[in-house]
Amino acid sequence: MFIHFTRLQWKSFFRSSSFGKSVAIKILMGFLTIYLVGVLIMSGVGLYFILRKLVPDQNPLWVVCQFMVYWVLIELFFRYFMQKLPVMDIKPLLISPIKKSSIAHYILGRSSVSAYNLMALFFFVPFGIVLISKGYPPLNIAAWLLAIVATVLSVNYVNFLVNKSNKALVVIGTIIIALYALDHFKVLPVTEIFGPVFHGLYAYPATVLIPIAIAVLAYWINFRFLKKRISLDDALQSKKKEAKTSELAWTRRFGDMAPFLQLDLKMIWRNKRTKSQVFISLLFVFYGLIFYTQDVYANMKVMHCFLGIFMTGIFLSNFGQFIPAWDSSYYSMMMSQNIPLRKYLESKALLIMVSVVVMFFLTIPYVYFGSDVLAINFASALYNLGVNIPVILYFGSFNKKRIELDQSPFGNMQGTSATQFLIILPVLGLPIVLFAIFYFLISLTAAVVVLSVLGIAGFALRNYFMERITEQYRKKKYGMITGFKEKN
């Protein structure tokens, strides 16, 4: 039956009306996947030698085991956003003589070979092979790798149980931050406590039965849950959701833009994909810690410029590049009304401006690493506000692909076209190139001043830019409406 279901899914994929569309994007994603797999394999192979160099007095496997508790929690946290729940069109199957248990087993079995599960194997298996080549007992390493597989599957099935709960996401995120804080400030030796637990899976191969039992238990709980939900009545019954209203009265101070702001804010809060963009943007505030804390990047001011543009403009890029596709489900209705298009676009610009300002304030603590960091981030924020916002809005006029808001943002190519790849050049590449030119030819101060002046000049020419952008949207109006109506 498993083979039969797989054959049906395969036929559905190739017979889909969307198959063959955006071939270039699919090819590009294929190359990116190959690149990612290669990076994971090389990282797994090189990890042993890197740890030998960094901590020569410690066993590399022991070091890895100490931090595996963070790996489990972080993977569970990011899977909430990244991993799509396994679904298939079961309505035609419910009127056929097929057992519900077979359908449930297929859905869960297919999820066990998802790309997210394989990513961990591409990293840990090469690491285990290197350990065996260095004299580690093959039986112990095999048991340890089997425990890794069982742990990955446990995370996979636990994610299905907590994926719909925002409270679970908050709890997991709080645990990660709390454990790191306790360990960093030496209140509780977290790595020393959990290190022996994961290392015991290597030292005592019989303990591999524990993670296997946890994986089986998580599978069984999911199986019972799915089996109860698979019925024709549930499939045909219309979904009922509790309506949640919010007046957002404070937006009225923005005049004609208030209705559009209210729509955007409600859309962001009520839909998984847009809400995820907010959480992802906030998480990327910590992106600077990867670079600012490393001595090798201390004098790489061009890298600091990249961080400034990226961190203060992360929501600008993630959310802005899909304007107005976020409104694709009702865009035709809006365009049929007598609404001021200029105000509609200005409301989008205002929303992104607020995000840039908020992200800049969140990056202010990085002044700890030097006043130059704060100056670069400030100049980057000005550039994003004055230049990148008009640029992102202009490129939005080329968006013609529909977006379903309830889908996960990761691994989801809805709304993606060549525009999303081309926009990287002016938004991220141009300011870095300008900064680098003036930094190397003149000084850091000159580079910061240039970005700041360009941002201020963008503000001064804001009305001119918005008028040109509005006219562009009017020209592309009917093409966008036609594109947004198409459902893949």
Image: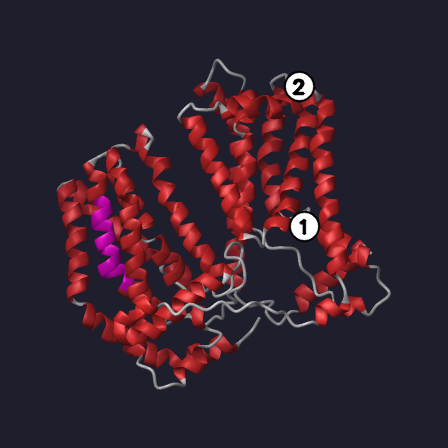
Q: Position of residue 24 (x, y in %)?
A: 50, 61
In this view of the protein, can residue 262 be seen by the observer?
A: yes
Position of 383 relative to 70 (above/below) = below
Position of 10 relative to 207 (above/below) = below
Q: Earlier in the sequence, mark 2 or mark 1?
A: 1
Q: Which quadrant: the C terminus?
A: bottom right
Check residue 403 in the rendering and tell me which mark sits there, or answer none. Answer: none
Kind of residue at disc 2:
Ala
Real-space CA distance between mark 2 and mark 1, rounded to the nearest whole angstrom: 30 Å
The local crowd at label 1, few if under 14, some if 14 to 19, many if 20 or more residues have their Cα within 10 Å, is many
Position of 51 relative to 256 (above/below) = above
* Disc 2 target residue: 203
* Number of on-image labels: 2
Q: Which quadrant: the N terminus?
A: bottom right
Q: Which residues are magenta?
A: 376-389
**Colour logic:** secondary structure
Residue 69 part of the magenta-drawn span: no
Occupied quadrant, residue 154: top right
Q: Residue at x 84, y 68 (%)?
A: 96
Occupied quadrant, residue 84: bottom right
* Disc 1 target residue: 111
Residue 387 part of the magenta-drawn span: yes
Relative horizontal placement of residue 349, taking residue 405 as reference (left or right): left
Q: Residue at x 24, y 46 (%)?
A: 377
Q: Residue at x 53, y 63 (%)?
A: 406
Q: Work out whether residue 121 or residue 203 is closer to the camera in this orientation and state it.
A: 203
Could you tell me which secondary element the residue under label 2 belongs to?
A: helix
Could you tell me which secondary element the residue under label 1 belongs to?
A: helix
Q: Work out whether residue 228 or residue 31 is closer to the camera in this orientation and state it.
A: 228
